[in-house]
Structures are given as structure tokens and as C-alpha cells.
Image: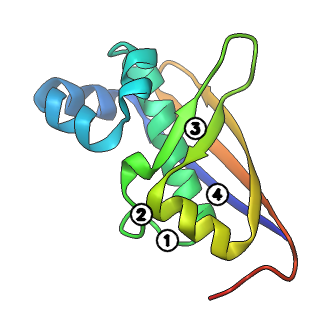
């Protein structure tokens, strides 16, 4: 079984929220590791925001189903970005039988996008 999610967001919109509510926005949406990686760069934060929304769609929960920080985007030198699930997102993925989530991020000057694909056992879904 394959699950997918995709999201697109305007980078200036993220930059505006970051400018108006920096601490509240960062602490509500991003883990410390994500904040450290992005270093306040709106394009990096926007692509990670899009990744979180794409994973929420993949999980079938939308933005109200799992907390923002239960989905973490990590990136290690020389490797593609990866999704690490925590708490409710991890529980939801386990119920769906999802064993792996592949992630692709991209951004231009104005837009950031993310695509997430989850692999699951066909017989694993437990509503």
C-alpha cells in the first residue's frame, strides 16, 4: 500500500509570520533541531512547513490530527531530508502500517513544496 501527501506554500507568507510572531511560530511548529538547521531562513522553514503538511495529508489527519512537532524533518550532510515521527504521528503511522516515508523538498524564490510517500503493508491498516 502507498500513501501520498503534497503541499505548496508561499515563502513570503512564512517570512511574514516569522517576522510578526517569531518565537510563537518557531516553538509551536518546529523542533529545536529544525530551528537550528533553518537558522531563521524563511525558505528552509517554508519547505519544512510544507513537509509537515504533506505528511499530515499522507496520514489522513490534516492539520488538526497530529501536533506539528510530532513530524520532524531531519537532514544529515550528504543525505536527502528524512521524516522522523514522534508521539501521535508515530502512533497513527503504525496503525496504518507505514514503515517508511520518502520525502522530497524544493523551493524557488517564492514557493516551497514538499511531497511525501509512505510505504505500508497491505494488511496492516487498523482503524
Q: Which residue is mark 2?
A: 66
Identify the mark at residue 106; answer none if there is no mark: none
Could you give the CA–CA distance between mark 4 and mark 2, rounded to whole angstroms?
A: 15 Å
Pointer 2: residues within 10 angstroms few (<14), some, or many (20+)? many
**Proximity of marks 2 and 3: CB atoms separated by less than 8 Å:** no
Q: What x and y, as percent, mark residue 120?
A: 81, 66
Q: Quadrant of the N terminus?
A: bottom right
Q: What x and y, as percent, mark residue 82?
A: 66, 35
Image height of 15 relative to 61, above or below = above
Image height of 83 relative to 44, above or below = below
* Residue occupying the point 16% across, 29% down: 23
Q: Quadrant of residue 5?
A: bottom right
Q: Which residue is mark 3?
A: 113
Could you give the CA–CA distance between mark 4 and mark 3, rounded to whole angstroms?
A: 11 Å
Can residue 8 be seen here? Answer: no
| Between 58 and 32, the one nearer to me in the picture | 32
Q: What x and y, as percent, mark residue 28?
A: 25, 43
Amino acid at each position: 500500500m502507498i500513501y501520498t501527501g503534497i503541499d505548496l506554500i508561499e515563502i513570503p507568507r512564512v517570512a511574514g509570520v516569522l517576522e510578526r510572531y517569531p518565537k510563537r511560530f518557531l516553538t509551536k511548529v518546529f523542533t529545536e533541531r529544525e530551528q537550528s538547521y533553518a537558522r531563521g531562513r524563511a525558505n528552509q522553514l517554508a519547505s519544512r512547513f510544507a513537509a509537515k503538511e504533506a505528511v499530515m495529508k499522507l496520514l489522513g489527519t490534516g492539520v488538526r490530527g497530529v501536533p506539528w512537532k510530532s513530524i520532524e524533518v531531519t537532514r544529515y550532510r550528504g543525505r536527502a531530508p528524512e521524516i522522523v515521527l514522534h508521539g501521535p504521528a508515530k502512533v497513527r503511522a503504525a496503525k496504518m502500517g507505514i514503515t517508511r516515508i520518502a520525502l522530497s523538498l524544493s523551493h524557488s524564490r517564492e514557493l516551497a513544496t514538499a511531497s511525501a510517500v509512505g510505504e505500508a503493508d497491505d494488511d496492516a491498516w487498523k482503524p
